[in-house]
Image (spheres, helix red, strand yellow):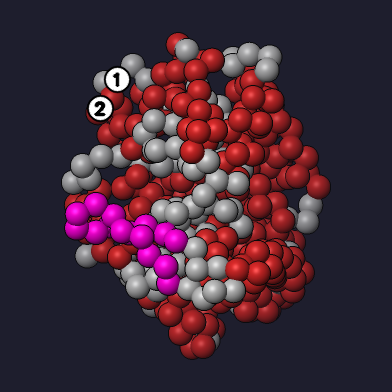
Amino acid sequence: MFALRDLVLAIGADSRPDALALHVAAVRYLYEPGALYTESAQALARTGTLPVPGHSFLYPPVAAWLGIPFAWLPDGVAVLAWTVADAAALVAALLILYRLVRPAGLARPVFWLVAAYFPPLFAEVDAGQVGGVLLLLTVGASWALVRRPILAGTLLGLAAAVKYYPAAWLLGVWRWRPWAAAAVAGALALVAGFVRLGPQSVTYYIGSVLLPSLHSSYADCAIVSVHTFSARLFADETFYVPSSPGIRAVNAGLHLPWLAQPATYFIDAAVVLAVLWATRRSRAHPLYAPLLALSLGALLPGEVNPYQMLPLLPVTVLTISLAIEKRRVELLALAALGLLLFVRQPCYSPFPNLWTVGALLLFATAVAAANLFAEAAENGGGRGTRSVEQRR
């Protein structure tokens, strides 16, 4: 039922500005490369806020490659074609992940129930974003990690060249070959992408697009990052929600502005340290540790739209599957609470950053399960938990 809902709502979407932006970027990359970042840089310089989707491009030029196969199509057809392609990549990623997790018994239907319910997955398809392709590359890297570590690093490097957050996956990998392969593949892809834009393109992108976007204002209620959570909760920062007519400004926090920035830094540091601790505690489990590290892509950026919570899905279904197998009711209850906080879209929730709280709960559930993966690796069993030595 959840999957059918997602399909109907995705087909019926009236516009996909993110997919349109990718299409426009691909056309410009082919025929007018010097104008790839013009509108984005101008909007950031003029307003200090993120440009309007559909008329801007903030990713590295490698991301524009994804739209090149559809660049010759009319705008509307290209947007639909890309959305279908990204959705297909998303389904393929879930099928590979299902084979890696190997859920048994009740965990089998629960795996697909969680995937179909997970609202960021629907948001990904609804927006026509690039997350499906990135999830396919990162899950593919997880599949290849033990079998072909150089291939794993190459896939990861390509994903990170499209959008930076997949690089967090490497924090859960304590082997040098995937790191080296990722660095080489990512660097070559970025160089190849920027070459077409001209000799000054790297400095222009960093100085006029990348750095200004990191310091822009996030007044949109759909932005559910840790940064906006702290700013809205402690500094009473204004955000805007849909209203009739137009939009209205909302303040729903405390008047403790001095606490907002330290709270952000504290949470960011805590989740990174938690990944390192859980990786060590699980003995660098070859599936759990990289997927837990990948989930940082949903927690660390200053701008996190609903679809950017997608990196939490792999480690969530992995943790829930093992918790069902081990009958760890407390982990299942914590995961259920985290998922429940996603039930309403951010802009229609009492507080948009309930999604942030839900994400932190899912992350905490995965971290708390580290010892289960260590035990599974020691026993040489468990779903998707065979030891590195056995797989070799």
Q: Nearer the viewer, residue 95 or 16?
A: 16
Q: Quadrant of the N terminus?
A: bottom left
- 135 in the magenta segment: no
Q: Position of residue 224 (x, y in %)?
A: 47, 60
Q: Please tell me in which quadrant of the rendered image residue 235 appears.
A: bottom right
Residue ID for mark 2: 77
Q: Residue at x 50, y 23 (%)?
A: 38
- 250 in the magenta segment: yes
In the image, the segment drawn in magenta is: 238-252
Residue ID for mark 1: 73
Q: Is residue 8 above or below residue 292?
A: above
Q: Residue at x 41, y 18 (%)?
A: 27
Which three-letter amino acid code belongs to the residue tagged 1?
A: Leu
Report whether residue 129 is seen.
yes
Q: Is residue 171 above or below residue 206?
A: below
Q: Position of residue 317 (x, y in %)?
A: 47, 67
Q: Residue at x 53, y 41 (%)?
A: 48
Q: Nearer the viewer, residue 132 or 59?
A: 59
Contact check, label 1 and label 2, Cβ < 8 Å: yes
Q: Position of residue 184 (x, y in %)?
A: 74, 32
SS class of the residue under badge 1?
A: loop
Q: Position of residue 134 (x, y in %)?
A: 51, 44
Instruction: Classify residue 27 as left or right of residue 379.
Output: left
Report whether residue 319 is seen.
no
Q: Nearer the viewer, residue 392 or 22?
A: 22
Q: Please tell me in which quadrant of the rendered image residue 363 appears.
A: bottom right
- Tag 2: Cα neighbours inside 10 Å, few (<14), some, or many (≥20)? few
Instruction: Classify residue 170 as left or right of residue 331.
Output: right
- 3D distance between C-alphas at marks 1 and 2: 6 Å
